[in-house]
Amino acid sequence: MSITKVTQHPTQNEELIFDRSQTGRIGYRLPKLDVEETNIDEIIPSELRRQDDLDGVPEVSEVDVIRHFTRMSTWNFSIDLGMYPLGSCTMKYNSRLNEKVARIPGFANLHPLAPVAGAQGALALIYKLQEDLAEITGLPGISLQPAAGAQGEMTGVLIIRAFLDKRDGEKSRERRVMLIPDSAHGTNPASAALAGFTVKTVNSTAAGLTDMEHLKKLCDEGGIAGLMLTNPNTVGIFEKNIKEICDIIHQAGGLVYMDGANMNALVGVARPGDMGVDVIHLNLHKTFSTPHGGGGPGCGPCCCTLELEPFLPIPRIVKDGENYKLDFNRPESIGRVKAFYGNFGMMIRALSYIQTHGAEGLKEATESAVLNARYVGHHLVEDFDKPFDSDPMHEVIFSHKKQTRKGVHTLDIAKRLIDYGFHPPTIYFPLIVQGAMLIEPTESVGRQDLDAFIDAMKAIAQETVENPDLVINAPHSTRIGRLDEAAAARKPVLRWQPDMETLSKTA
Ligand SMILES: *Cc1c(COP(=O)(O)O)cnc(C)c1O
């Protein structure tokens, strides 16, 4: 072992499990057999058995395995470790109670094919959550089937399409334009395209709002199927003209889809249904406290007006007297979008979250989320360029404009934050702000942590002036520094290849 290696922290220095391998080392020693040995040939025919000696499989003890994976787990940042201000993602702390409730054996072990009579409790839970989310959004039609926000979007725009096809018959083919603001999340145009729509982009104003004149102009061009709008939008600003926007779209014969990923700024305070929105998706894994990241599982409920309700995916979970049942008899439904009824575990956590907060608590969480973002916005406005003047809602956007003069960019600031113990915010999104840093603290960050984050950001602004190289070469405290992310994505190394020379030496 070289000197530099000995001086490094063992946790930071952990190698591949293959490198830990010692020939002959084992994890378990079993007692001698006290029954007669079975002839393996009688059980598994030899042609089905592997012939080699498991060459290259690591030979390690139990403690090797435990330490290896525990050490690796510390390379990740997690919501339980600290503030995770990833804008648009709403990375809030997930109460342990919600996790505990999701593990109640009657729920956790229920088979998705259990007969309806044996799943009444689960169906009652789904029904109750549907009622609560309908109340929160002001949109009474609801399906919890979609497994992500993006799938909720696709469900929503397919519903719009089914509605237009029914309303306009053959003529509906002339109505295939979906309007989407230039600030939108990339999933919006993707969902619209998948549902057979053509996307036209609506400009944003210098104030970060939908450009009303441009919207009207696009509507005048005709063929409008609808608009997909995020509110508050992706720069964290409430679209205050939302009622007028909805009127314009409705007058043009289209429907309004709201991307509800930012509902953390509205729950208990304002309802999309009251604003004139026709259909919305929620992200239970953002707003309603379910752990997320790493690809799921998630839950992206689709909520809509009574007019659109017949088109929701089947089966619907409905009340039948005192009991609950699955209703497949919905001839206008767009069909099924997910196996069984969606990701039930998310629904348990969401209902637990809603019930433990209560109506007042949900409103308070929303107010705290907005206050926290405004607090960060207020304290960083002198050190970083804040491209929009208006008060932000639950997330605040800055850019690297002041730092680029010193050669420091958003990516460098993000990497340097890691040295200060924070997960970086969302960077370079939305695309309409050059070098964007989208900071969303959520309600689950206290004053102390907010102040520490602000101090870290201020310190980085100071370092940029005094010693830009410190920021440009960050992080300095992690096992590895900067990755070639493009190469990692394009040429992933998915398989460890044994070094044949070392292998033959140890054998
Ligand atoms: C997260 C997000 C989505 C997509 O939701 P997923 O659950 O990740 O599929 C869509 N729009 C916005 C604004 C988002 O932040």
Image (spheres, rainbow, N blue to C red):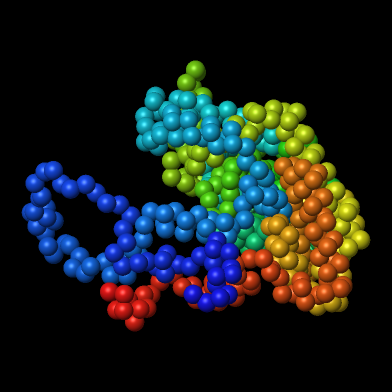
Numbered-mark total: 0
Residue sitting at x 76%, y 55%: 439
Residue sitting at x 55%, y 72%: 5
Quadrant of residue 21 in the image?
bottom left
Q: Nearer the viewer, residue 146 or 351?
A: 351
Quadrant of residue 347 in the image?
top right
Q: Nearer the viewer, residue 306 or 416?
A: 416
Q: Residue furthest bottom?
A: 501
Seen in the picture, residue 408 relative to 63 is either above or below; the reply is below
Q: Nearer the viewer, residue 274 or 255?
A: 274
The answer to whether residue 501 is left or right of residue 450 is left
From the image, which quarter does the C terminus lie in? bottom left
The answer to whether residue 8 is left or right of residue 66 is right
Q: Position of residue 240 (x, y in %)?
A: 84, 47
Quadrant of residue 279 in the image?
top right
Q: Position of residue 403 (x, y in %)?
A: 84, 71
Is residue 301 visible in the rendered image? The answer is: yes
Seen in the picture, residue 253 relative to 197 is either above or below; the reply is above
Q: Position of residue 355 (x, y in %)?
A: 64, 28
Residue sitting at x 46%, y 59%: 68
